[in-house]
Amino acid sequence: MTSMTALDTLVPGPLSLAGHRLGTPQQAGALTMVPVAGPAFPGFAPPRTGLKLTRVAGYGQVELANRADSGVAIVPLHIGYIQDRAQNHALCRSAFLAAGQTVRFDDACCVQQSQGGYLSERDQWFFVLPLELRARALDLRGVAGYSKLWDDIAALNARHGLPRRGHLEQILSRKRAVLTQFQSRLEPQPGQLGALFFVSGRFAGLEIAPDPRYFAEMWTALVCFAYGVAAWHAEPAPPGPGAPYDGVQHGADQRQSDQHGAAGLAGLRAALDRDRSARLTEIGGWLADLPTGPVELREEERYLDLRLSTVTGAHLAGQIVTDGDRTVYASLFAR
């Protein structure tokens, strides 16, 4: 299906996603993930094994290091870190780090309104800011002020029925068991280096990594936190008495399996094929209905032939890394 294989309409102007293609959609409750495969660009330091948060220099000031022996690191857009006995922070922007380089980000945002302390590396793990906070965080790049996202975090907590405080760990840590169900229900495919995410049938984001290893190390942060939080909030009410519910609904394949299990293996396979075809058609319609309009592309940083640019528009925002007209990395989300 043309609408399921052409992605160029999702990136602005002359930038190209030629060669990238969409795979079979997967669904877990309100969250739909469509795998993206395509040409890999090896030689980039992956985010978990290559990058390290080395120091919280002060409120709103964090240092990241590229610990890889070789390869430039593309700092994932809106990456944040949770550490025991330290103030939790997230970045408002992406960046390049050469092998062995350490960079201090003075425009980071604190995502924990109190209970600070010292960095403890052994308890460190990273996330990506939830979709609901990403447009605001991007607007605040380059703006100093550690508390600049607290009001937005407090409003997000309130929408989820949590205390209205600037503590993102109320969602990320205390609801982690619920959010990680998305990780177990949606599985990255061999060779996958990106994904389209939809929440309740609406475009939520497009994530493209340089290669499958980079994407694999981003998987949990994206599916559980960047998009899982919005999907969790959009989950339908649990079924009535007598119907078990575990917080995340099974996908369409499971529903069809339940309905056609007695029809024999051939009948079940035919039913699943019909269901997948219908899902492809449905998601093709979602793609065709994506809001469009002019976007601004602003170059922020260069590293050799690589260009880091910010994308802003009425319907879309994020950052993208290109090499010539080829898209190497993209993190674009709906506004």
Image (spheres, rainbow, N blue to C red):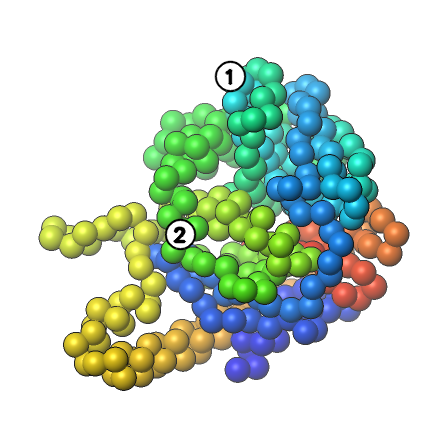
- In this view, the mark in front (2 or 1): 2
| Any part of residue 307 in sight | yes
Residue sitting nearer the eye, 14 or 267: 267
Question: 154 or 251, which lies in front?
Answer: 251
The residue positioned 77% from the left and 42% from the top of the image is 69
Q: Residue furthest front?
A: 69
In-image side of 230 versus 14 (left or right): left
Location of mark 1 (residue): 115
Mark 2 and mark 1: Cα distance apart in space: 31 Å
Amino acid type shown at disc 1 = Gln
Give the number of callouts.
Answer: 2
Residue 199 at x, y = what percent?
Answer: 44, 57
Q: Nearer the viewer, residue 235 or 258?
A: 258
Who's the residue at 55% across and 71% down the image?
22
Read off the residue under disc 2. Answer: 184
Residue 235 left/right relative to 91: left
Residue shown at the point (50%, 47%) measured from the top left: 220
Disc 2 and disc 1 in contact, CB within 8 angstroms: no
Q: Residues within 10 Å of mark 1 (few under 14, many from 20)?
A: few
Judging from the image, what secondary structure is the residue with disc 1 in?
A: loop
Q: Is residue 309 above or below residue 109?
A: below
**Which residue sits furthest right?**
304
Looking at the image, tell me whether mark 2 or mark 1 is earlier in sequence order: 1
Element on which disc 2 rests: helix
Looking at the image, can residue 196 be seen?
A: no
- Is disc 2 surrounded by few (<14), some (14 to 19) or many (20+) residues within 10 Å? few
Q: Is residue 241 left or right of residue 199?
A: left
Residue 58 position by quadrant: top right
The residue lying at 58 percent from left, 76 percent from top is 5
- Asked if residue 292 is positioned above or below residue 273 in the image, the reply reads above
Locate residue 270: give its quadrant: bottom left
